[in-house]
C-alpha cells in the first residue's frame, strides 16, 4: 500500500488522485492523505481511520486518510490558511512510511511560493524537506522515465550560483548516491553512469571554463579507480539522443535545467521524480500544480500513475 500526500489543494492534485484511482482500480493500491472534501465531485471515497483499513476500503472507492484543512478547495487559487495543513500532510506521510504502515510515499505537487508565504516553509522543495524529515540524510533527486534516468548534482539554486556550489564533494556524493540506488532500487548490478560537463563542449580543454579540469575530472578519475563505470565529462548537447542513451543507465547533470529539459522533452507525461538516498521509497509526478487548468477536469493523471507504479517497482526491488 502506497501513501499519497494530497499536495496543494488548489492545484490538480485532487483531480489526478481521483483519476489515478479510477484507472488503476487496485492494480497499484494506494490511499490519499488529505481532505476528502477536496476531491472532485462524484469521486467514490472511503474515509479510513488508519492505513490498515485502506486495502479493504480500496476495493470500491478511493481510500482517504482524512486530514483537516481550513475551508473548501478553490481551484487555481492557493490559500495561505491551508499552507500549514499541506506541510503537515507531508510530515504525516513520512511518519506513516517510517512506521511501516505504508510501503512507500508518493507526493502530489506542492506550490512552494504558497507554502513559503502561508506557512513559512523554509525548504526549496519536497526533496530537501523529506531529507530533513528523514533525519538530515544526504539525498539526490532523480528524474526517471521509460527513456532516461537523470540526476542533477545541484538542484534548486539560481544558475549564477551553480559554479561555486558544484564542489568535488557534492558531485561525488551525487554519483555515489545514484550508483547505490541503481543497484538497490533498480536492480542494476553494475551501473553505467554518464557525467555531463558544466560548460559548453565540456569546457573544451579549459577554453570555455575550467570546472571540468579542476572539479569534475578528478572526481571521476578517483571513482573510476574504485571500480565505478563512469563516462565523461561529456558535452551535454550530445548526451541525450537515442544512441547515446543506450550506452548508460543514468546520467549525472550539473544543474537543474540541464537534467530536467531532456527528461521533460522525452517523457513529459511519464516522467517520475524519485528521491534517492532516503530510508524509504519516495516518488512524485514530474510536473507542478498546474493552477491554470485546475478544476477544469482536463488534468492528465499519467505522470502520477507512473509515479505510483514506479514506487511499487522500487519497493519490490528493495524487498528482493
Image (spheres, helix red, strand yellow):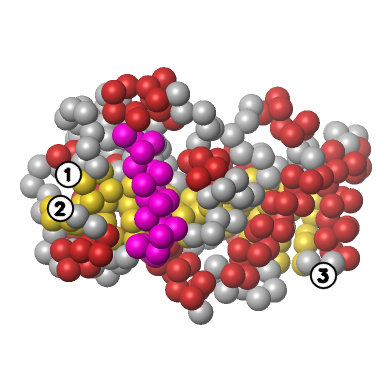
- Magenta residues, as a range? 85-107
Q: CA distance from mark 3 to mark 2?
A: 51 Å
Determine whether label 2 and label 1 are within 8 Å by CB.
Answer: yes
Q: CA distance from mark 3 to mark 1?
A: 51 Å
Q: Residue 227 got which mark?
A: 3
Graded by Cα atoms within 10 Å as few (under 14), some (14 to 19) or many (20 or more), the crowding at tag 2 reads many
Write down the residue under mark 2. 47
- Mark toward the start of the polypeptide (3 vs 2): 2
Q: Quadrant of residue 124?
A: top right
Q: Quadrant of residue 292?
A: top left
Please state the horizontal and vertical placement of residue 222, each as a whole percent of the image: 88, 58
Please state the horizontal and vertical placement of residue 205, each as a whole percent of the image: 91, 42
Do we see residue 238 in this rendering? no
Determine whether label 3 and label 2 are within 8 Å by CB.
Answer: no
Residue shown at the point (68%, 69%) measured from the top left: 191
Dot 1 falls on a residue whose secondary structure is helix
Residue shown at the point (55%, 68%) measured from the top left: 185
Q: Residue 36 got which mark?
A: 1
Please state the horizontal and vertical placement of residue 275, each as a whole percent of the image: 53, 52
Graded by Cα atoms within 10 Å as few (under 14), some (14 to 19) or many (20 or more), the crowding at tag 3 reads few
- Mark toward the start of the polypeptide (2 vs 1): 1
58, 134: nearer the viewer: 134
Q: Quadrant of residue 26?
A: bottom left
Amino acid at each position: 500500500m502506497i501513501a499519497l500526500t494530497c499536495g496543494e489543494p488548489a492545484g490538480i492534485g485532487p483531480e489526478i488522485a481521483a483519476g489515478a484511482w479510477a484507472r488503476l482500480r487496485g492494480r497499484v493500491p494506494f490511499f490519499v492523505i488529505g481532505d476528502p472534501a477536496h476531491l472532485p465531485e462524484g469521486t467514490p471515497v472511503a474515509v479510513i481511520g488508519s492505513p490498515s483499513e485502506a486495502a479493504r476500503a480500496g476495493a470500491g472507492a478511493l481510500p482517504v486518510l482524512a486530514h483537516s484543512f481550513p475551508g473548501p478547495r478553490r481551484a487555481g487559487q492557493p490559500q495561505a490558511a491551508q499552507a500549514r495543513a499541506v506541510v503537515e500532510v507531508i510530515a504525516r506521510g513520512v511518519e506513516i512510511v517510517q512506521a511501516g504502515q505504508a510501503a512507500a510515499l508518493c507526493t502530489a505537487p506542492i506550490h512552494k511560493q504558497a507554502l513559503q508565504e502561508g506557512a513559512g516553509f523554509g525548504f526549496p522543495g519536497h526533496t530537501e524537506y523529506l531529507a530533513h524529515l528523514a533525519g538530515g540524510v544526504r539525498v539526490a533527486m532523480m528524474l526517471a522515465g521509460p527513456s532516461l534516468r537523470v540526476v542533477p548534482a545541484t538542484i534548486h539554486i539560481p544558475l549564477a550560483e551553480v559554479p561555486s556550489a558544484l564542489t568535488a564533494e557534492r558531485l561525488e556524493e551525487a554519483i555515489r548516491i545514484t550508483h547505490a540506488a541503481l543497484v538497490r532500487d533498480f536492480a542494476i548490478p553494475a551501473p553505467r553512469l554518464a557525467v555531463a560537463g558544466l560548460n559548453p563542449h565540456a569546457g573544451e580543454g579549459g577554453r570555455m571554463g575550467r570546472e571540468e579540469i579542476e572539479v569534475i575530472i578528478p572526481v571521476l578519475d578517483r571513482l573510476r579507480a574504485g571500480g565505478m563505470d563512469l563516462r565523461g565529462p561529456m558535452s551535454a548537447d550530445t548526451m541525450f539522443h537515442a544512441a547515446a542513451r543506450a550506452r548508460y543507465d543514468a546520467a549525472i547533470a550539473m544543474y537543474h535545467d540541464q537534467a530536467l529539459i531532456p527528461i521533460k522533452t522525452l517523457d513529459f507525461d511519464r516522467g517520475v521524480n524519485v528521491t534517492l538516498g532516503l530510508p524509504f521509497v519516495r516518488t512524485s509526478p514530474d510536473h507542478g500544480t498546474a493552477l491554470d487548468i485546475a478544476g477544469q477536469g482536463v488534468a492528465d493523471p499519467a505522470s502520477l500513475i507512473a509515479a505510483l507504479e514506479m514506487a511499487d517497482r522500487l519497493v519490490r526491488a528493495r524487498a528482493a
